[in-house]
């Protein structure tokens, strides 16, 4: 209920902020051509193909028979549950799927957390790289917000470092559990079960991270592959803006990556609402509010609706196969 409440509040804020532009935004949406929609679908499929490759590389560390097809299927499978549960079920879905395909559940948890850490690192590096490449363009349009943008980068860096420490640092775990044990004692043991479960999960993370993080070349390759994967989603708005305003593909990806990074620090489940708000706000000064609002909705269509629908087909097919297996 809390997740749904946050989403409703953010959507309400978006509607109120851009209430005078609702008509023009809808008019821009009507102008969307089938070619643009096909391009958006292709970009999101390529994103999940790259995501599946990352999962496969990691999973093969624990199960050499894990196939690339399994990795891609897992990517869409998780996307379905990400939307269906407003972000909360994606990790559970990944652990279940990987566990069913030869990666132990304890290893699956560590694998998913490390993959998420690489994802956050790639977003920060990719955004900073494009900011440097397009520094003149970005400074000319967002100089007035430089301190706000800097705060967003710092907050993203802090979140990323905490995630890395949570995944890899045994010393971080010891200090964290020292505090939790003290807090549990103050609560007269009421947190015993929760602390015990968290301790077990952190132990799983340490085991997974030792095997993967020790290979620096592998880590660098996965982060680089994650950055390539990001290009497919960050390039979606360019399909909408092309021919309508003066903006290049690198400039589009620079602004989109900045919007995604800033939206990620807002407390919105799966980025619903926050991404649209920040995206429209940043692009409105470049393409106009109507076109920016239309592009934000099409971006959401490509990053949420399309993978959700493909994932739904996979979920239905799995359940049909499971029922057939039960009959025989």
Image (cartoon, rainbow, N blue to C red):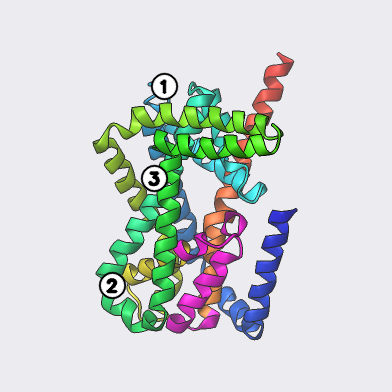
Image quadrant assignment for residue 149: bottom left
Percent coordinates x, y for residue 41 in the rendering: 49, 55
Q: Is residue 153 above or below residue 226?
A: below
Residue 273 horizontal/vertical position (percent): 61, 65
User: Which circle's residue, 3 or 2, is located before the other in the chain?
Assistant: 3
Q: CA distance from mark 1 to mark 3?
A: 20 Å
Circle 2: element type: loop
Report the residue at 32% width, 63% height from top. 128
Foreground disc of the pair 1, 3: 3
Q: Nearer the viewer, residue 12 or 46?
A: 12
Please tell me the numbered disc located at residue 252. Answer: none
Q: Where in the figure is residue 4, as x and y percent of width and height? A: 71, 57
Q: Judging from the image, what secondary structure is the residue with disc 1 in?
A: loop
Q: Which residues are magenta?
A: 261-290
Q: Choose between 157 and 61: the one closer to the eye.
A: 157
The residue where tag 3 is placed is 118
Indicate which label's residue lies in the foreground, 3 or 2. Answer: 3
Residue at image point 58% right, 34% down: 181
- For residue 273: magenta? yes
Other residues around mark 3 within 10 Å, as few (<14) / some (14–19) / many (≥20)? many
**Residue bearing the label numbered 1:** 63
Q: Nearer the viewer, residue 119 or 2?
A: 2
Q: Residue at x 40, y 49 (%)?
A: 161
Q: For residue 134, which numbered disc appears in the image?
A: 2
Q: Quick one: which residue is furthest to the top in this view? A: 328
> Label 1: how many residues lie within 10 Å, few (<14), some (14-19) or many (20+)?
some
Q: Is residue 38 above or below residue 238?
A: above
């Amino acid at each position: 209920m809390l997740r749904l409440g946050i989403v409703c509040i953010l959507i309400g804020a978006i509607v109120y902020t851009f209430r005078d532009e609702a008509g023009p935004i809808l008019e821009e949406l009507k102008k969307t051509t089938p070619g643009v929609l096909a391009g958006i679908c292709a970009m999101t499929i390529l994103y999940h193909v790259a995501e599946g490759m990352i999962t496969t590389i990691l999973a093969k560390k624990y199960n050499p028979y894990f196939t690339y097809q399994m990795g891609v299927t897992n990517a869409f499978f998780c996307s379905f549950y990400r939307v269906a549960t407003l972000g909360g079920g994606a990790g559970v879905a990944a652990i279940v799927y990987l566990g069913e395909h030869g990666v132990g559940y304890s290893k699956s948890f560590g694998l998913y957390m490390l993959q998420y850490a690489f994802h956050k690192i790639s977003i920060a590096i990719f955004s900073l790289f494009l900011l440097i490449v397009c520094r003149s363009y970005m400074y000319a349009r967002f100089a007035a917000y430089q301190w706000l943008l800097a705060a967003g980068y710092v907050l993203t860096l802090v979140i990323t470092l905490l995630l890395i420490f949570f995944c890899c640092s045994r010393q971080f775990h010891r200090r964290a559990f020292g505090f939790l044990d003290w807090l549990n004692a103050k609560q007269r043991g009421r947190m015993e079960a929760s602390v015990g479960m968290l301790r077990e999960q952190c132990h799983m993370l340490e085991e997974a991270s030792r095997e993967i993080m020790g290979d620096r070349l592998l880590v660098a390759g996965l982060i680089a592959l994650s950055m390539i994967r990001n290009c497919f989603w960050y390039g979606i708005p360019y399909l909408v803006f092309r021919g309508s305003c003066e903006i290049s593909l690198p400039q589009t990806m620079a602004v989109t990556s900045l919007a995604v990074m800033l939206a990620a620090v807002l407390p919105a489940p799966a980025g619903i609402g926050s991404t649209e708000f920040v995206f429209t706000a940043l692009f409105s000064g470049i393409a106009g509010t109507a076109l920016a609002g239309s592009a934000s909705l099409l971006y959401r269509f490509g990053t949420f609706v399309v993978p959700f629908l493909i994932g739904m087909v996979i979920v239905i097919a799995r359940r049909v196969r499971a029922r057939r297996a039960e009959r025989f």
